[in-house]
Amino acid sequence: MENQFDLIVTGGGMSGVCCAIAAARQGLRVLLVEKGGCLGGTACASGVMHLLGGRRYDAASDRMTREVGGLFDEITDEMIALGKAVDPDAIDVHHYNPYGWYPRMAAGIACDVDYLKYHLERKCLESGVRLLYCAQVTGVETADRRIKALTAHGPGSALHLSAPLYADCTGDAAIAAMSGCSVALGREGDHAVCPSTLIFYVDHVDTGAYVAYQNAHQSPKLVEIIQDLREKGIWRYPFEIFIAIETAEPGVFMVNTPRQTHVDGTDPFSLTQGLIEGRRIAYDLLDIMNRYFPGFENARMRRVFDRMGIRESRRILARHMISLPDALAGRHYESCVASTTYNFDLPDPDRPSYDPMMGDAKNPNANRQHACIEIPYASLLPREMDNLIVAGRCLGAEREVMGACRVMGPCAGMGQAAGNAAALAVQGDFAAVENQALRALLRAQGCIGCR
Ligand SMILES: Cc1cc2nc3c(=O)[nH]c(=O)nc-3n(C[C@H](O)[C@H](O)[C@H](O)COP(=O)(O)OP(=O)(O)OC[C@H]3O[C@@H](n4cnc5c(N)ncnc54)[C@H](O)[C@@H]3O)c2cc1C
């Protein structure tokens, strides 16, 4: 394989794709290494088809606003124009609707994930990104605060990959951890993580009947039905809210209801247990949906995904960690390269339907929404390696803050920032990037998140 690259991006999720495209458009020779067989990461491999955080419903103007811009808008606008995604502007947000109950949820963009795989792939290739699928980075060679090379394993082969610059877009901070950078896994103390979900899709849903029930009973999550089923001994799960969102195909819903506790996304044994349990729950839950949930009487299993949906694993301990007090105070950074206006969203590791940042009167932070959390450049930089940048879910932020940054809009924004930073890291040192030059590049590319 031709082995002359300026940047190696590991991880082809939303952050990695945007990082690779942004860098390639700046003229860098980019290799994107992905252990799976497609791009899109959690969106495509785990089936999370509802892209949040890129748009926001603004109650004052009663309009959807754009919050990330840049490549996120480019990708989603193209998907909408192709008829492969639902335009949030066309959704009636004044009533419960099949794309998420509240206006802020309806700002998500429901995509056809199989088409999204294809679309992201086309865009990477057109930008000149070299793709390497089916190769998992398993080792990192380091010296003098620099990554020298990566080892990747494919089926029956080992590859030695090197470049002056590296981006870790693995969601798990895998490259940072393998390089010996400081990382944190889950909750301080016991390292417990937010619940995970094995997503499944069902078809033959009577959308009208489901939404009519939600509106007639003012019950977006069918809590009273679930309570009744629990009292009758039928509902035996620890989670107790129903989350189902219509995909880009009418009558086909993504079911994001099961929340499995204590699945460690960095441990294959734990993931295996999670997948086995997730598949059992999917079929068991569909049976309950058929019997008791309005609109789902004739629903059939369309597809159970085979990649566990991991909300939280490792984060880097970055040169700047975004703290919860700063996030709540709306701290402004001159070095802001991306941001999120999505709400805090990180269900409790032990109580899967409870979100500590949302619903407890005893919690001083409960229900405190933020206008905007700015993501400074230094929160993408690991402390120990000079030629490594991180983007996406594993950024350097306290875990509650990560809960607001982890959705796909901000991940795309961070990726675009990281790819442009690579183009400016001429001496191979990400910390030396001139920040105003980076922000000027991002603004010129239509990025709104770099406020
Ligand atoms: C159940 C669930 C529901 C969610 N709901 C929503 C939602 O409705 N809307 C929303 O916007 N967000 C949602 N999220 C969050 C969001 O999907 C993810 O946080 C986001 O997609 C993360 O993007 P990323 O690019 O950081 O990582 P990922 O999308 O996880 O991509 C990382 C990629 O790196 C690859 N990789 C990892 N390690 C290696 C390695 N060593 N070598 C090679 N490749 C590697 C992986 O295969 C993967 O493709 C949800 C998440 C979950 C789990």
Image (cartoon, helix red, strand yellow):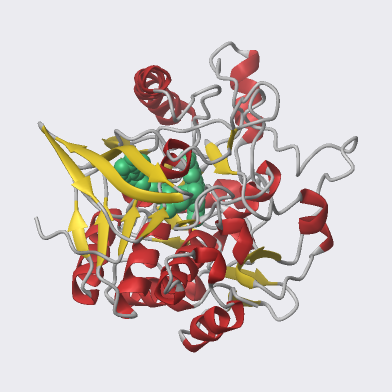
Direction top: furthest residue: 233
Is 244 or 69 nearer to us in this picture?
69
- Residue 349 relative to residue 278: left or right: right
- Residue 184 relative to residue 166: left or right: right
Q: How many marks?
A: 0
Dividing the picture into quadrants, the one containing residue 125 is bottom left
Is 116 or 90 nearer to us in this picture?
116
Dividing the picture into quadrants, the one containing residue 143 is top left
- The residue lying at 30 percent from left, 48 percent from top is 149
Q: Position of residue 176 (x, y in %)?
A: 47, 43
- The residue lying at 40 percent from left, 56 percent from top is 167
- The residue lying at 62 percent from left, 57 percent from top is 379
Q: Position of residue 36 (x, y in %)?
A: 24, 43
Can residue 205 be spotted in the picture? no
Q: Is residue 107 above or below residue 47?
A: below
Q: Position of residue 1 (x, y in %)?
A: 9, 55
Direction bottom: furthest residue: 444
Q: Is residue 267 above or below residue 315?
A: above
Can residue 349 be spotted in the picture? yes
The C terminus is located in which quarter?
A: bottom right
Q: Is residue 283 above or below residue 231?
A: below
- Residue 161 relative to residue 164: left or right: left
Direction front: furthest residue: 144
Q: Position of residue 196 (x, y in %)?
A: 50, 32
Is 67 or 94 nearer to us in this picture?
67
